Amino acid sequence: MAQLLSSSCSLTLSSRNKPCLKPFDHGSTSFSCKNSTSPFRRLFLKENKSRKSSVVIHATAVSTSREAPVQTSSGDPFKPKRVMVIGGDGYCGWATALHLSNKGYEVAIVDNLIRRLFDHQLGLDSLTPISSIQNRIQRWKSLTGKSIELYIGDICDFEFLSETFQSYEPDAVVHFGEQRSAPYSMIDRSRAVFTQQNNVIGTLNVLFAIKEFREQCHLVKLGTMGEYGTPNIDIEEGFITVTHNGRTDTLPYPKQASSFYHLSKVHDSHNIAFTCKAWGIRATDLNQGVVYGVTTDETAMHEELVNRFDYDGIFGTALNRFCVQAAVGHPLTVYGKGGQTRGYLDIRDTVQCVELAIANPANPGEFRVFNQFTEQFSVNQLANLITNAGEKLGLDVKAISVPNPRVEAEEHYYNAKHTKLVELGLKPHLLSDSLLDSLLNFAVQYKDRVDTKQIMPSVSWRKVGVKTKTVTN
């Protein structure tokens, strides 16, 4: 796996004017190690200086039909939706790619598979066994008859991205393709730098690709509620109207990021807003809350479609972590006082929100911000919910307070607006007793795969240093 991931995509262009980048035939395709300057390659080479490799993959052209333009709900003429899901091998991306394919969209996944490399480097693993992306897509095709095209490469490599755009010609781009963990970005200097370079440059490349090759393409970008921080006023959806010294204006809502990861998302939002104004790009920024759950209608269809489920202190989210801790008899790890309050949503609502954003695109030049969550909980409230649900299943669940590795308010006001997606038709899956029972039973089913050494937090916001950290078990 590591050898595959060390390779940058190198594909030959035909003599015709249009690049001839071809999607993978899910067998093997050809990569060669070029002198790429992408942060993905630099991070890999930092830890694998002695490895050189190439991988051979056979690619075949896939013909796709083009029908007459149709009218979207916004009144803009668009071809039938061809959606490019960047980061489609990840937690949110995989579930979204299957959901959109199942809803009749033509889907292509673009991914450099680095999320799998992170597990390899840090000694982590998903609670659920996950198949290779090639096997996943093959299984989806065998079950549904629907094809998902696959492009493996790094979007920080603009040559790869531009060829992919010209080959696939997307009507919408769903951009999940970023390093998504705040703790990961705080491990050491190299991971902080990687996070910002990978996320900010990757998004910039996507914006330039849209401008150059698909100017009507709608960008649906995954942001985060963490951009806002925890202000002592209500959080609006992206913008706030302010009256100051007798004058009134509507301005972007103030950002108070709390990690190098969250800061990268703030930079993304600013860059997207600027390009909408300067270039007329249409974009929707989905400021997502904390996602929980693992199962969607599509991932439940076969074991090879199962999504990843992270429970460790670096990539695991609060509710998912608590479910696994309860399943193995580990005390629930409440950071500090436990009053930290955030917006949460089921992964089934993540895919629903993305679909709604695509079906109701922003206008050219419009930068929309939707706060994407369904309920608010404090960490203590989540711990109480898991404790009560666990007792009903015969589990002995206890919660303990552990020193907070983050720099954050542990008791604060929090009231965030989230009406725009509901107005578009979102039907939320709220956190019910039955869902908690399902999550706990799921964790119990796979508890033999839990590495208890990965449960406690190991990354400190205050102790992050310049020396690259390695994992020792």
Image: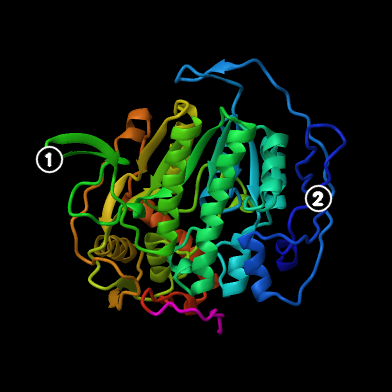
Q: Residue furthest bottom?
A: 472
- Which residue, as the protein is rendered here, is positioned at the far left? 246
Q: Which residues are magenta?
A: 463-473
Q: Position of residue 396 (x, y in %)?
A: 33, 73
Q: Which residue, given by chain and number where applicable, does mark 2 sit on?
A: 27
Mark whose residue sits in front, 2 or 1: 1
Residue drawn at 45 percent across, 20 percent down: 73
Q: Which secondary structure lies at badge 1?
A: loop
Task: Please state which of residues 133 and 263 is positioned toward the viewer in this rendering.
Answer: 263
* Neighbour tally class for label 2: few under 14, some 14-19, many 20 plus, Cα within 10 Å: few
Indicate which disc, 2 or 1, sits on the residue closer to the N terminus: 2
**The magenta stretch spans residue 468:** yes
Which residue shows up at 79% across the image and 70% down it? 52
Q: Is residue 297 magenta?
A: no
Q: Is residue 260 above or below residue 238?
A: below
For the point 62% across and 53% down, the residue is 156
* Label 2 – label 1 distance at C-alpha: 65 Å
Residue at 49 percent across and 63 percent down: it is: 310
Residue 356 in the image: x percent, y percent? 45, 32
Residue 319: image quadrant is bottom left
Q: Main secondary structure of the magenta part?
A: loop
Amino acid type, label 1: Asn
Spot occupied by residue 74 in the image (x, y as percentages of width and height): 45, 20
Residue nearest the viewer, comparing 27 with 246: 246
In the displayed structure, does residue 137 sit left or right of residue 298? right
Q: Relative to 140, say whether 81 is above or below.
A: above
Residue tagged by mark 1?
A: 245
Farthest right residue in view: 15
